[in-house]
Image: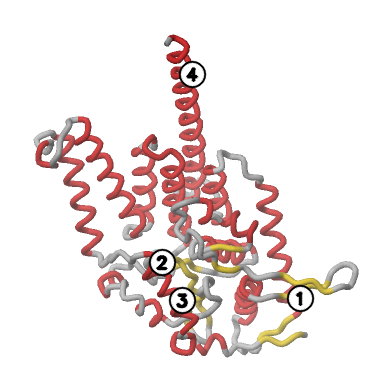
Amino acid sequence: MKKVTHIYIILLLSFTSNAQDINGIYEQAFKKIHCMLNETCSLSFKEAVFEVENAYYSNKLSKTEFDNKISFQINLINSFITSRDLIYDYPDKENVKKCAAIFSIMTDTIPILLKNDEIGYHIPFSYDFNDIWGHQNWTNMFVTKLLETKKGNCHSLPFLYKILADEIGVKAHISVAPNHFYIKHQNKANGWYNTELTSGMFPIDGWLMASGYIHLDAIVNQLYMQALNDKQMIALCLIDLAKGYEKKLGSDANSDFILKCCDTTLKYFPNYINALILKAETKKKIFEALMARHQATYPSQVLNLPEAESIFNDMTVLYSKIHELGYRKMPEEMYLNWLVSLKEERNKYENKKITNFNTKSE
């Protein structure tokens, strides 16, 4: 019996030590991203994304390998820019060429001249319909997974696009839709336009509205379809950090850390729906844990406690705000149908003004 007890204690101490290590890693990642937001260090979306993914891997990702893979994509993009000319006669032609090059590298098969004068082919990135929201494996949301497998989703694809745009010095804005991210650009010829990496198209806003889950209030309140600024895009990474932390530690995750990520994000992006939902759900878990400690079956049984009343009020206010802002939950099946509709009804939803830009080899 003593031997069993000793083994249990050793396992418990080992797990506690591991959890402490994970907490330390995540705190360091938070500080590195937060310093970008409070301007005590340089803003870098690429660095913020790496910090999020490296924390989940317990600081075991190779920064050199990550940078090299990004550099490989940049070299392809630069080669594409110099070898092609865009039929576009406006002052911002060079920037538009850069955007076109990123899009082509990510969505088209590109012939590459190899050292032995043979022709190889750069295979485009594609949409991975397996575990699209990372329920089974959180790393399916990662840019590092996308770079390794060439398969990604509506999180990793636009995030990689944004990284590549930053690296070649062209503006790209991430935008939010229900359960979805995409890219917004602006040019002299057409103003703002959308870039959708999951289907390799330039959809009009009508496609986003066709989902049926973008309430007019959600647009007015800037939940969706806004071109995010630099700090807002960095702030997205803090919610990814919090979600990864929660996935990694499960019920042992520190709610204070998750709430700190949410509150910091909301300071820079007040109506970021994923931050509001995560904060509300975290408050709900805290309240449910308090009910369990007091062996309560109904909320009313603990609301006489000041702590419980405060948490319950916070939670209620958050859920009410989320609904009033215009959020409507989109089921996974509906989301997939919506994505597929873009390809099936391409002529209906494609922005012809953008797709009519043609390139010619120099």
Q: Earlier in the sequence, mark 3 or mark 2?
A: 2
Report the mark closest to the observer, 3 or 2. 3
Q: Are marks 3 and 2 in contact (CB under 8 Å)?
A: no
Distance, label 2 to label 1, CA atoms, is 33 Å
Q: Report the residue marked by disc 2.
A: 176
Residue, far right: 116
Disc marking residue 111: 1
Q: Report the residue marked by disc 4.
A: 10
How crowded is the residue under tag 3: few (<14 C-alpha within 10 Å), some, or many (20+)?
A: some
Q: Indicate the position of residue 1 as horizontal and vertical percent values.
A: 42, 11
**In this figure, which colouring scheme has been used for the structure?**
secondary structure
Distance, label 2 to label 4, CA atoms, is 46 Å
Q: Horizontal placement of 224 versus 155: left or right? A: left
Distance, label 3 to label 4, CA atoms, is 51 Å
Q: Indicate the position of residue 226 as horizontal and vertical percent values.
A: 39, 70
Question: Which type of secondary structure does the marked residue at label 1 adopt?
Answer: strand
Please state which amino acid type lies under the numbered disc 1: Pro
Report the mark closest to the observer, 2 or 1. 1
Q: Are marks 1 and 3 in contact (CB under 8 Å)?
A: no
- Residue at left offset 65%, top offset 56%: 148
Q: Indicate the position of residue 192 as horizontal and vertical percent values.
A: 46, 79
Distance, label 3 to label 2, CA atoms, is 18 Å
Q: Is residue 10 above or below residue 276?
A: above
Q: Earlier in the sequence, mark 4 or mark 1?
A: 4
Q: Report the residue marked by disc 3.
A: 340
- Residue at left offset 49%, top offset 70%: 183
Question: Which type of secondary structure does the marked residue at label 3 adopt?
Answer: helix
